[in-house]
């Protein structure tokens, strides 16, 4: 519940600050689209690699792997893919800033 209250406060503050201003241009949309694609491809590759790893190993070697652990690994793959997308977005923004300043 507290996260929804914090989200409401932050969104109200951002709306009051940037209410009718344009916060993105075409360059921002392109950078966001490229980082989202990278994040999606990394997530799909991670999920496929994990599925292949599950199928390729014999069952007697997988006794330690519970359903909860599998769920945590899948969530970790999604979080890691999102983190890679955010890092790529920050690198691209930094590169664009350096080009604009030069």
Image (spheres, rainbow, N blue to C red):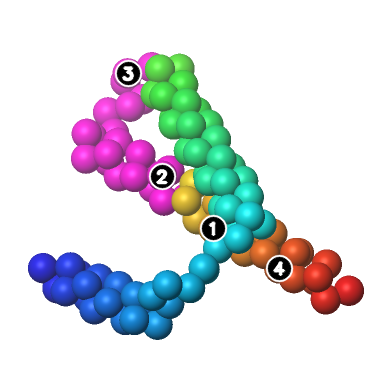
Q: Which residue is mark 3?
A: 59
Horizontally, is 91 left or right of 9 in the view? right
The tally of labels here is: 4
Q: Are marks 1 and 4 in contact (CB under 8 Å)?
A: no
Q: Residue furthest front?
A: 20
Q: Main secondary structure of the magenta part?
A: helix
Q: Are marks 4 and 3 in contact (CB under 8 Å)?
A: no
Q: Which residue is mark 4?
A: 94
Label 2 element class: helix
Q: Which residue is mark 1?
A: 86
Q: Is residue 8 inside the magenta stretch?
A: no
Viewer-nearest of labels 1 and 2? 1
Badge 4 local density, few (<14 within 10 Å), some, or many (20+)? Answer: few
Q: Which residue is at a point 44% across and 31% down the rendered structure image?
A: 47
Cα–Cα gap, marks 3 and 2: 25 Å
Quarter-of-image position of residue 8:
bottom left
Viewer-nearest of labels 3 and 2? 2
- In the rendered view of the protein, which quadrant contains the C terminus? bottom right
Label 1 element class: helix
Q: Which residue is mark 2?
A: 78
Q: Which residue is at a point 67% across and 64% down the rendered structure image?
A: 93
Above or below 5: residue 50 = above
Given residues 33 and 92, the one toward you in this image is 33
Q: Which residue is at a point 57% across and 46% down the rendered structure image?
A: 33
Cα–Cα gap, marks 1 and 2: 12 Å
Disc with the residue nearer the chain's start (4 vs 2): 2
Q: Are marks 1 and 2 in contact (CB under 8 Å)?
A: no
Cα–Cα gap, marks 4 and 2: 24 Å
Quarter-of-image position of residue 63:
top left
Percent position (x, y) of residue 2? 14, 73
Q: Identify the magenta region.
A: 58-80
């Amino acid at each position: 519940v507290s996260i929804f209250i914090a989200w409401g406060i932050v969104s109200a503050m951002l709306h009051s600050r940037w209410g009718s201003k344009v916060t993105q241009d075409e360059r921002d949309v392109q950078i966001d689209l490229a980082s989202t694609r990278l994040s999606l491809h990394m997530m799909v590759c991670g999920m496929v690699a994990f599925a292949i790893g599950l199928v390729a190993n014999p069952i007697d070697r997988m006794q330690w792997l519970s359903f909860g652990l599998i769920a945590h690994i899948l969530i970790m793959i999604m979080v890691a893919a999102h983190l890679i997308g955010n890092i790529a977005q920050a690198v691209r923004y930094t590169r664009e800033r350096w080009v604009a300043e030069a």
